[in-house]
């Protein structure tokens, strides 16, 4: 009996020993990887280091988009002792719904966000409460010091610092940088013991972007655009100020606009960059193309006379009208007084093939290449698909669709002596240390017209302001050259609206040494709707204020100096 008990105990001990050996084998060999990962998860932690998003500056290094240091609050629900009380305190201090916080604290997770990107003062108040299970991590929030200024150019970045609109979206890969990682070792209470810098990777901050925009010119442009819209009740409007020789965009504005710091409260139409994404029939401003083509091909001279048929002309199967009835006009006056009949007669001399050739030369029907998202090429149909009446409509800006930016580039051809420049809005991209990553430079696409043709066209555009359809903006301050445009809006159901128009004015100044080209387009203004009446004064004010800011001598001062 005793011996049997001894054998039973012996076999029991042997069985226990083999069980322990099997368990040890299972832990050390079979389940090694899973348990090792659990241990690493408990004792090792990898912190993601957020990179600093690049700053966006204007041409003089005035910040347009910056980062604010913030704190984000998260919880480890496993260590929160009184979840009801904690939720109540956090909801009151952080102005969030209590049920939302309580729902987060009841999750079976080691990490849940309570509130992202809290002001440092607000986070410090919460920190002083020493709530168990509540922790803080440094983050940054995108901020726009000028609120709505250049909103459609800059765009915005979301909560995770990801670009969502404008240049923030287009150059997100350059601005956002690359995150880093820091390894740390924790004890059994999950307290940090030390950092393992050997395996850590530092964050790489994003590049900075310096724009060609001038905040002063941008402010002037936005202010004048808003005044025009409110005075004439326009549905929307766009304005561009451009250096005609370099293609630098000094200002680009759309109305309505929105506050970049409160982008979530804005509507989609308010965020639309209409200056590059919307097309419209330009109307009479497009006559600069027809006029330049005729002069450049030697088809006409400034003093050639055209019978304007007393305002009514049967051509191409339709009756063409002028707003004012004219008998005979010189070619210069045809443009100055914006005669449709005179312009069409010039276009007939040039021929549809040549007219289309110059349309393409001036850059219509193709993207300008601006570094902004969503640009469209417009609509320009080849002569092979023109109808019989298209030679009577396209040369005067109907049956063709353009963007405001394309108009600015086309006008620059005349201002700079005949060359199509590529517009650009980024001066350079650089590192935080100031090292230039990429420099953007002026680029001439092609010669469009001769210098002599450009000078003759300038003369005509000056006449528009002194004696023609824009004489209401003529002043002694600066010698402005411009062109008016009033075009009926296309009705989506077919044809044109009888009482809805695009009012446009394009201009550059000073005449002999142009410093700026300005384009203003107003959609559906009323009660006034003529380009010279609605958009003309806005362009004049932008030019006067901008050139004065630039220190350009006034027209009267230059005349006095030249007469000495």
Image: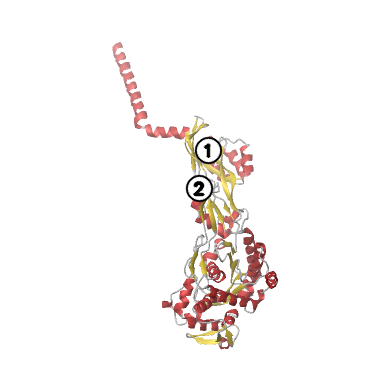
Mark 2 lies on residue: 177
Q: Is residue 350 above or below residue 168?
A: below
Q: CA distance from mark 1 to mark 2?
A: 29 Å
Question: Which residue is more in the foreground, 36 or 378?
Answer: 378
Q: Position of residue 132 (x, y in %)?
A: 57, 35
Q: Would you say residue 543 is visible in this rendering?
A: yes
Q: Is residue 271 above or below residue 92?
A: below
Q: Position of residue 481 (x, y in %)?
A: 61, 73
**Quadrant location of the N terminus in the rendered image:** top left
- Report crowding for label 2: few under 14, some 14 to 19, many 20 or more residues within 10 A (C-alpha): some
Looking at the image, what colour scheme do you see? secondary structure
Find the residue positioned furthest to the top.
2
At mark 1, the secondary structure is: loop
Q: Is residue 424 above or below residue 47?
A: below
At mark 2, the secondary structure is: loop
Q: Would you say residue 495 is visible in this rendering?
A: no
Q: Position of residue 146 (x, y in %)?
A: 63, 55
Q: Position of residue 552 (x, y in %)?
A: 66, 65
Number of marks present in the image shown: 2
**Quadrant location of the C terminus in the rendered image:** bottom right
Residue for point 63% across, 40% down: 124
Residue 350: image tag: none
Residue for point 47% across, 70% down: 365
First-in-chain label (1 vs 2): 1
Q: Mark 1 or 2, which is nearer the eye?
A: 2
Mark 1 lies on residue: 76
């Amino acid at each position: 009996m005793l011996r049997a008990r001894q054998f039973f105990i012996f076999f029991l001990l042997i069985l226990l020993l083999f069980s322990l050996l099997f368990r040890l084998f299972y832990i050390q060999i079979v389940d090694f990887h899973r348990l090792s990962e659990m241990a690493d998860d408990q004792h090792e932690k990898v912190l993601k280091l957020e990179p600093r998003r690049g700053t966006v500056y204007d041409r003089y290094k005035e910040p347009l988009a910056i980062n604010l240091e913030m704190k984000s609050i998260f919880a480890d629900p496993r260590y929160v002792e009184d979840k009801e009380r904690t939720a109540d305190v956090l909801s009151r201090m952080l102005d969030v719904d209590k049920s939302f916080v309580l729902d987060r604290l009841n999750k079976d997770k080691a990490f849940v966000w309570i509130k992202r990107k809290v002001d440092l003062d607000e986070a410090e108040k919460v920190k002083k409460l020493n709530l168990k299970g509540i922790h803080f991590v440094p983050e940054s929030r995108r901020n726009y010091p000028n609120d709505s200024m250049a909103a459609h150019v800059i765009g915005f970045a979301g909560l995770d610092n990801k670009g969502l609109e404008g240049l923030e979206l287009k150059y997100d890969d350059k601005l956002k940088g690359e995150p880093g990682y820091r390894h740390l070792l924790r004890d059994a209470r999950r307290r940090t013991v030390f950092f393992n810098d050997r395996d850590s990777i530092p964050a790489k901050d994003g590049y900075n972007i310096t724009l060609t925009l001038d905040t002063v010119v941008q402010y002037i442009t936005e202010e004048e655009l808003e005044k025009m819209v409110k005075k004439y009740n326009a549905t929307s409007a766009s304005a561009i100020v451009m250096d005609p020789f370099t293609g630098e965009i000094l200002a680009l504005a759309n109305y309505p606009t929105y506050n970049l710091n409160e982008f979530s409260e804005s509507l989609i139409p308010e965020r639309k960059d209409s200056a590059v994404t919307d097309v419209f029939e330009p109307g009479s401003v497009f006559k600069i193309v027809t006029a330049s083509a005729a002069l450049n091909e030697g088809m006409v001279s400034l003093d050639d006379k055209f019978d304007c048929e007393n305002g009514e002309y049967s051509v191409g199967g339709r009756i063409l009208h002028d707003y004012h009835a004219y008998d005979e006009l010189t070619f210069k006056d045809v443009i100055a007084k914006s005669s449709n009949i005179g312009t069409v007669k010039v276009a007939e001399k040039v021929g549809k093939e040549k007219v289309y050739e110059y349309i393409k030369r001036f850059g219509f029907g193709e993207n300008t290449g601006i570094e902004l998202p969503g640009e469209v090429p417009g609509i320009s149909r080849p002569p092979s698909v023109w109808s019989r009446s298209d030679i009577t409509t396209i040369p005067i800006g109907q049956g063709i669709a353009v963007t405001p930016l394309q108009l600015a580039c086309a006008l620059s051809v005349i201002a700079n002596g005949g060359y199509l420049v590529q517009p650009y809005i980024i001066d350079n991209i650089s590192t935080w240390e100031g090292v230039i990553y990429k420099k953007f430079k002026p680029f001439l696409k092609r010669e469009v017209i001769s210098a002599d043709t450009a000078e003759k066209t300038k003369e005509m555009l000056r006449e528009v302001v002194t004696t023609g359809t824009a004489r209401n903006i003529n002043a002694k301050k600066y010698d402005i050259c411009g062109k008016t445009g009033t075009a009926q809006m296309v009705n989506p159901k077919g044809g044109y609206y009888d009482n809805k128009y695009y009012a446009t004015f394009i201009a550059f100044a000073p005449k002999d040494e142009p410093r700026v080209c300005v384009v203003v387009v107003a959609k559906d203004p009323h009660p006034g709707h003529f380009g010279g009446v609605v958009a003309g004064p806005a362009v004049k004010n932008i030019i006067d204020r901008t050139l004065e800011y630039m220190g350009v001598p006034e027209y009267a001062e230059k005349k006095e100096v030249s007469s000495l």
